[in-house]
Amino acid sequence: MVPIAYEDIVKAPKALLHDHLDGGLRPATIVELAAEVGHELPHSDPDELGRWFVAAADSGSLERYLETFAHTVAVMQTEPALRRVAAECALDLAADGVVYAEVRFAPEQHLSRGLTLEQVVEAVLEGFAEGAELAAGTGRPVRIGTLLTAMRHAARSQEIAELAVRYRDTGVVGFDIAGAEAGFPPTRHLDAFEYLQRENFHFTIHAGEAFGLPSIWQAIQWCGADRLGHGVRIVDDITGDSLGRLAAYVRDKRIPLELCPSSNVQTGAAPSIAEHPIGLLRDLRFRVTVNTDNRLMSGTSMSREMALLVEAFGYGWAELQWFTINAMKSAFIPFDERLAIINEVIKPAYAKLL
Ligand SMILES: O=c1[nH]cnc2c1ncn2[C@@H]1O[C@H](CO)[C@@H](O)[C@H]1O
Ligand SMILES: [Zn+2]
């Protein structure tokens, strides 16, 4: 088999379901925005700052990993800053060959300089549209769907769920909860999830990353999550190739797992890329997808995550296409639009590579 070149992975179309807007800023942009608002950073040189984020996030604990977001959230408190960060996000994903991405952020974290929730959402949606238009102009079209996140330690999930539904026809395609998992079970936000179900809306839940099976079980069986953010600890319910009841349910129902290899190694959810449960979960044919989580904190990209898996597990184009189609099938945009991207963009491109 001819080894897969990194440039070819970049060129191949990719679909991304789990990427945080505030975890993907360009270091140079953080430096500029921080100077404008007088926010003090650990480094003022972009390269050093980029390295600082990766090192600080490499802590082995989700709680400490999340502390690094103080510096990105601090510079995302005005409409121009939010628009810029969102536009650059679309451009960076497109340049990396991502053709479809769902990008999430928590509107409630962007109110410290007086913006309303609506102003925050509208600025981000405008930025995505602007960036996607510029990307299309360079021959790199990308479709961005926005997910609104509520912070699980806070108490605004119902409000954010209603906000997501209000913007469902203008770019918001789903809802999520994020933040420290241990001590903040999904059922804390049951009202919001029941509301979303009654609205026929879509949501994913960060579960099974820093806490195990009970969190996954609640996310699916109490809250009705369409997908699992990470869900990597589902392996705790698998012995050899024998599946426990919950793992069997997740596989049988084709519940998508938004796996984020590099992020999991940094927070201690997996010991290394080579030992990441993605290998087992793929072999067992769970609905596995590959994601970046936080490109800044992991110093990564969609192509890099794919390349790491190629290196660790010897995957070829067939597996990369499978991950990509799994993601596209699991997206929150309408079925006909998902199918169009699979049949008109993804399959023809991989047919030339396989
Ligand atoms: O992997 C993760 N697990 C849990 N929470 C996360 C993760 N990555 C980011 N955030 C949290 O989500 C917020 C909104 O984007 C971020 O500010 C961060 O606190
Ligand atoms: Zn995440």
Image (spheres, rainbow, N blue to C red):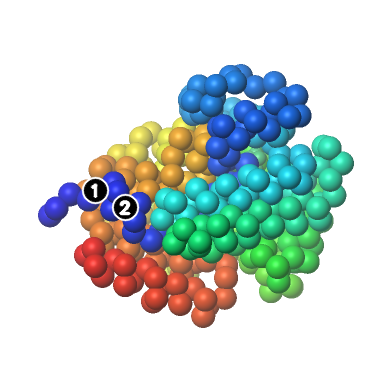
- Residue 151 seen by the camera: no
Q: Amino acid at mark 2?
A: Ile
Residue at point 70%, 26% (across, down): 35
Residue 174, quarter of picture: bottom right
Compared with 283, 33 (above or below) is above
- Residue 130 seen by the camera: yes
- Residue picked out by circle 1: 5
- Residue picked out by circle 2: 9
- Real-space CA distance between mark 1 and mark 2, rounded to the nearest whole angstrom: 7 Å
- Which of 3/325 is in front? 3
Is residue 145 left or right of 346 when viewed as pictured?
right
- Which of 160/24 is in front? 24
Give the quarter of the figure containing the N terminus: bottom left
Compared with 192, 252 (above or below) is below
Q: Position of residue 341 (x, y in %)?
A: 45, 72
Residue at point 38%, 45% (across, down): 305
Q: Position of residue 307 (x, y in %)?
A: 31, 46
Beta carbon at label 1 within 8 Å of ligand 2: no
Kindly state the secondary structure of the residue where label 2 is placed: helix
| Cβ–Cβ under 8 Å for marks 1 and 2 | yes
Kindly state the secondary structure of the residue where label 1 is placed: loop
Residue 210, quarter of picture: top right
Q: Residues within 10 Å of mark 2 (few under 14, many from 20)?
A: many
Q: Amino acid at mark 1?
A: Ala
